[in-house]
Image: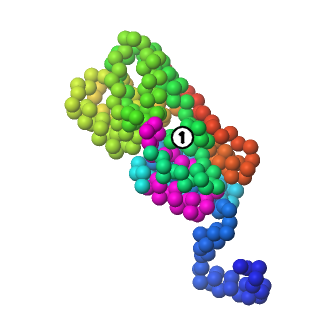
Amino acid sequence: SPEKVKAKTRDKILQIAEQLGYIPNAFAQNIKMAQSPIIGIVADDTFNQSYAWVIQELCRQAEVKGYSVMIFTTQGERDSEAKAINALVGYKAAGIVLSAISDSPGYDASHLKVLLNSRTRLLQFDRQFDESLPAVFVNDARAGELIASVVNEKGYKNVLIIGGEETSRITQTRINSFCQHLSASVQVTPLYADYRYPRAKEIIATHFSANEANYDAIIGINGAISLAARNVATRWRLRDVDFLSIDDIPHAEDYGFYYCCVVHDYKQWATIVAENLIAAIENRPWQQRTMINGFLKNHR
């Protein structure tokens, strides 16, 4: 260790190391430490705009506080999620922001026990594998209610609402709340797709090819799904149909696409995630469970 080496010898070693461009092994340095100055982000799909905001804000705040951020994208693969968590726990990461690959009630989260048994702080973001653990999440019932109010006001009669996987808590809560607050005269067709854009686009295209697309409104329950629906509808040259969304579609207005949506303040969301995780790591008071309420945008 450095304190057992003479100052003159240590300075000479450091000088040679600098000349050689030597980078110390962070893992070896952290073996005797209870924690390392690492924060991990483990997310299913960074295409999601809200995830991008969280990554940016967490990186900004972490750098100020002296932490380094490691980012893992799991692409919906349980093995990838397990490897990411194992790597971060192995590095004795101070904290992890996790958006689990599944929020279905029957999801096997046994691979995450290694995290719960470690000293690494956990903050779930958006999707939750355990609704009793710390998290920052959306008021999904409120989002469904808000989009239903627009459908009622506009007088739509035949609506397609597209979710993620049918077993997803987020999908079920948003669609169920939407249906509960609708006028009885509205005919609703639910379509269960995928939260990831490429797969969602494929499932929506298959639906349109097998069914008469006589909808007067199409709703996506998140931004990626809404964008996939818009893409498919454009290729199918669907006319006289309005698009609505829960969550914003990234940069849609730059392409002349204006639509009504329920949005959540991504910057606020990201700030809450970053501030709470760092406060937890530093053993300061923090809000363990925070629910974000949405609001209507472009509602005319």
Residue 260 in picture, x, y percent from top left: 46, 27
Percent coordinates x, y for residue 189 in the rendering? 33, 23
Q: Secondary structure at mark 1?
A: loop
Decide: is 66 above or below 44: below
**Vertical arrangement, residue 161 with respect to residue 44, above or below:** above
Quarter of the rendering occupied by the N terminus: bottom right
44, above or below 178, in the image: below
* Quadrant hosting residue 241: top left
- The residue range painted magenta reads 80-107
> In this figure, which colouring scheme has been used for the structure?
rainbow
| Residue 60 visible in the shown view | no
- Was residue 90 drawn as part of the magenta stretch in this picture? yes
Find disc 1 in the rendering and name its residue. Answer: 130
Binning the other alpha carbons within 10 Å of mark 1 as few (below 14), some (14 to 19) or many (20 upward) gives: some
Residue 97 colored in magenta in the image: yes
Q: Position of residue 59 (x, y in %)?
A: 60, 54
Q: Quadrant of residue 212?
A: top left
In this rendering, would 19 be left or right of 226? right
| Residue type, label 1 | Asp
Give me the residue at 47% from left, 23% from top.
177
Of the pair 231 and 189, the residue shown nearer to us? 189
Residue 68 image offset from top left, x and y in percent: 62, 60
Residue with the most extreme left position: 210
Left or right, 234 with respect to 91, comes to: left
Q: What residue appears at the point 55 percent right and 55 percent down from the top-left corner?
A: 114
Residue drawn at 68 percent across, 85 percent down: 13
Residue 165 visible: yes
Front-lying residue, 15 or 194:
194
Residue at horizontal 50%, vertical 22%? 145
